[in-house]
Amino acid sequence: RVRLRLPSNAHSFQFEELAKYIDSHEEEYVEILRDWVAVESVSTDVQKRPDVERMMEMTAEKLKNMQGKVELVDVGQQELPDGTTIPLPKVVTAQFGSDSSKRTVCIYGHVDVQPASKEDGWATEPYNLTDLNGNLYGRGASDNKAPVLAWIHTVEAYQKLGIELPVNVKFIIEGMEETGSDGLEAMVKVQKDSFFADVDYIVISDCGWLSRRPALTYGTRGNCYFHAAVEGPKEDLHSGVHGGTVIEPMTDLIGILNTMISPSGQILIPGICEAVSPMTEKERATYESIEFDMEDYRQNIGVERLMHSNKVELLAHRWRQPTVSIHGIEGAFSDPGSKTVIPARVIAKFSIRQVPDMDPKEVEKQVKEHLEAAFAKRGTPNKLKVTMVLGAKPWLADPQHLLYEAGKAAVKTVFNVEPDLVREGGTIPIARTFQEVVDKPIIMLPIGGFDDGLHSQNEKMSRYNYIEGTKLFAAYLHEVSQMKD
Amino acid sequence: RVRLRLPSNAHSFQFEELAKYIDSHEEEYVEILRDWVAVESVSTDVQKRPDVERMMEMTAEKLKNMQGKVELVDVGQQELPDGTTIPLPKVVTAQFGSDSSKRTVCIYGHVDVQPASKEDGWATEPYNLTDLNGNLYGRGASDNKAPVLAWIHTVEAYQKLGIELPVNVKFIIEGMEETGSDGLEAMVKVQKDSFFADVDYIVISDCGWLSRRPALTYGTRGNCYFHAAVEGPKEDLHSGVHGGTVIEPMTDLIGILNTMISPSGQILIPGICEAVSPMTEKERATYESIEFDMEDYRQNIGVERLMHSNKVELLAHRWRQPTVSIHGIEGAFSDPGSKTVIPARVIAKFSIRQVPDMDPKEVEKQVKEHLEAAFAKRGTPNKLKVTMVLGAKPWLADPQHLLYEAGKAAVKTVFNVEPDLVREGGTIPIARTFQEVVDKPIIMLPIGGFDDGLHSQNEKMSRYNYIEGTKLFAAYLHEVSQMKD
């Protein structure tokens, strides 16, 4: 499966040996991924906090067993909506090597996951890693447990073969990424001059390829996540007994949600689209050159028609345009079957992806003003409260940087192709923080497949991407050591 | 607590003895209600079907212990949305007395309940009957377990005191009322000339008073319950990775739901309001005479302002006007916290209360046409499917009938006041079936309080209504035997 070539600029680099080692440990890598997926480390659900804590401990344990210098860093408390606080999961840091003559690469990853349950429509048990036709199905398999393990296995492979690490490797692994990396930003600020003092580059592998071709990622969207609560009667009411006597909170909520997006998907909140930086001609040219099969994508997600009919527009709306998604409504009847209730308090959850030059603070103001005006216009006696629970900025890097050249070389070594240079529609909140606080170049080096189903039912990581991805990381460490800057 | 008077037209009626017996058995009545409430007989959730079955058996057992002629009637299968079938809960029938010189009264009730869980905001465990300040809190306490028990205890009190029942009493107790009385209509048709052959009158006690004054009910609204499903991608999508490339099903669903109701609560579906029979002057006069404190009602349900500011309009919209209530959305994210998902398939649940002269078949057509047109106008690639899962007609009786005179007399005996003559906004699907198939006069004789919280959090039955209600039923059986028709 692996195409063996000598890396472009290496003399003594023992890639073949590393690749063989990685291939021969595939089943061991799958088994540890199974152990990790089995932990329901859902960070958005405080009930699952003990699982997240356990996941952090397992991660630290693994790194300690490899003789890393490991710490479980206390990053403080999380404030819950009811005003109480609970401890945030600890952040795991680790260090392998401190040779000042070498560059130091810091690998970021996370081991918390999005919620999942069989009832959502999974074909398999989401926390029981299931191997089907070379795909490993399970919540968190691709986002982000296998990539974190691939990095760990990379260091382990060097160690086990007695090959000296070409760079110092640091890890920073968190357990709150899916809620917006609570506590991590403060921790990065605090450790700016300690843990991060000798870090030269930051590598993040928390995204996926665009197609079957490997990719390097130079931008992510941010995200502003809102809760809009409409409150009416003091308790739920029988819709027969009381229907017709009250303005129902659901009617109001649906009315104001409907003012945000046009039927064709345009954002109708004033100021949002105006803030987006225009596409340059150079950017358009880059987009045009990207390998992306619209029909393949359409079939993969299974819609009858995409929102945009040409590739550049579609990719632009995935990567460099904002979107509003309404995720659901809390407090109303959401089970199968029927219930004749007037819900008393309903909370819509929606989010707006952020791109340059949007500013979450501005977006918060725009959304609140827009929804409050729409609500006021209805003349309802109910009450509206809009809260922005997360405001993560977008991140954008320079794809001309040497880090990306190193990425291209590593991709060439392992896959013998040129990678796509892409952006990512999703949000990795900490990327922007690294950029602003640590102020060192960042690359996103994904190994996830384009069809991994992140945050969705039937999330998976293919054995191919997991194993070849580990080789890619092994090659990348070497390439970084060889950069001529 | 009980005001003792000799019933208006009785010579030998031993009401005082019955009332004393009932008072002295209050704690026993509360204990059996506790046992019944403990059974989670939720008929809308097929997972709870064994609990409903158990509830039917407990009901039959109780009636058998009183030497009733009891049957557990098989009423066939329920077809589930996935096409499979499960057995419907058996219907319990019972008979006490078959003296052809006496009238025969058939008591209808149900022992299934609406869903409930502590997380919905109950102050107490919903299936653990909790006694607070004379109120018995628990799911199904008022709807409809205590009223069913009150009728059973009425017969038992006559028996235990050795007082001859003044009428033959039949019971028909079902376990699917909350889903629309599946199977019961067919059963009533089948037993029209057997079980129902000697029935003279039907009494239903499945509603509540309008205020602290007892009420007799002469009408109920029907209900058409709809599921509107919008389907887009084949699975849920990550809203970052894919947001901006697809028209989201939630956006479409919210768009079409918003076309059904105006901000002030008017129904915008063509044909619905046009079908409503106009209010007569006589009707208006009746409404004006009803004791109903708007401010008390407003405070009780806890809204800042009611939908209508005068009593007649408000009562008319509760009882003789249709309403649309949107109950919730299945398939979207409905938990606390945040999830960044594009739900692939979302199903809105809403219902339209039915009044004369609406016809559920017509309403089904009107709703489908309206939503399909609104959906088509959006030009979305997603798919819409609207299903009417329940179509229950309204019921209206003649409040001048002797049954209501008997009711007034019984209320006078127990409470020494005139009852309100009211209609009910809720739906008792079987009332219309009894009217059409059995074709015998029906009365609704409620004992529930106006603030019992049916279908809501913190449902309760007060000890006062439970015990005085039992006395009311005891008096009513006598009054029916004395009717001069």
Image: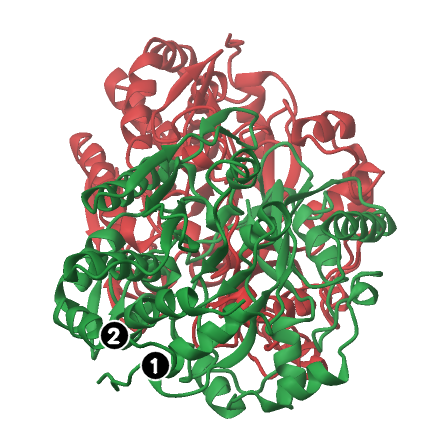
Chain colours: A green, B red
Badge 1, how many Cα within 10 Å: few under 14, some, many 20+? many
Q: Is disc 2 placed on a helix, strand or loop? A: helix
Q: Position of residue B345 (x, y in %)?
A: 49, 69
Q: Residue at x 26, y 37 (%)?
A: B96
10 Å crowding of disc 2: few (<14), some (14-19), many (20+): many
Q: Residue A371 appears at what percent x and percent y?
A: 78, 51
Quick one: B171 or A89, which is closer to the camera? A89
Residue type (three-letter) at the residue carrying disc 2: Phe
Q: Which residue is mark 2?
A: A15
Between B160 and A208, the one lying in front of the other is A208
Marks 2 and 1 in Cβ contact (< 8 Å)? yes
Callout 2 and callout 1 share a chain: yes
Rendering quarter of residue B148? top left
Q: Chain of mark 2?
A: A
Image position of A163 (left or right of B298): left
How many labels sit on residues?
Answer: 2
Q: Is residue B116 above or below residue B299?
A: below
| Image location of residue B151, percent across then percent down | 37, 31
Res A437 → quadrant: top right
Identify residue for label 1.
Answer: A413
State whether residue B180 is above or below residue B22: below
Residue at x-position 26% and y-position 55%: A37
Q: Earlier in the sequence, mark 2 or mark 1?
A: 2
Residue A78 disc label: none
Q: Is A233 in front, or is B298?
A: A233
CA gap between label 2 and label 1 equals 9 Å
In the rendered image, residue A485, in percent from the top left (x then y), is placed at 54, 66
Q: Secondary structure at mark 1?
A: helix
Q: Nearer the viewer, residue B445 or A263?
A: A263
Measured along the vertical axis of the image, is residue B368 above or below residue B403? below
Residue B257 in view in this figure: yes
Amino acid on which disc 1 is placed: Thr
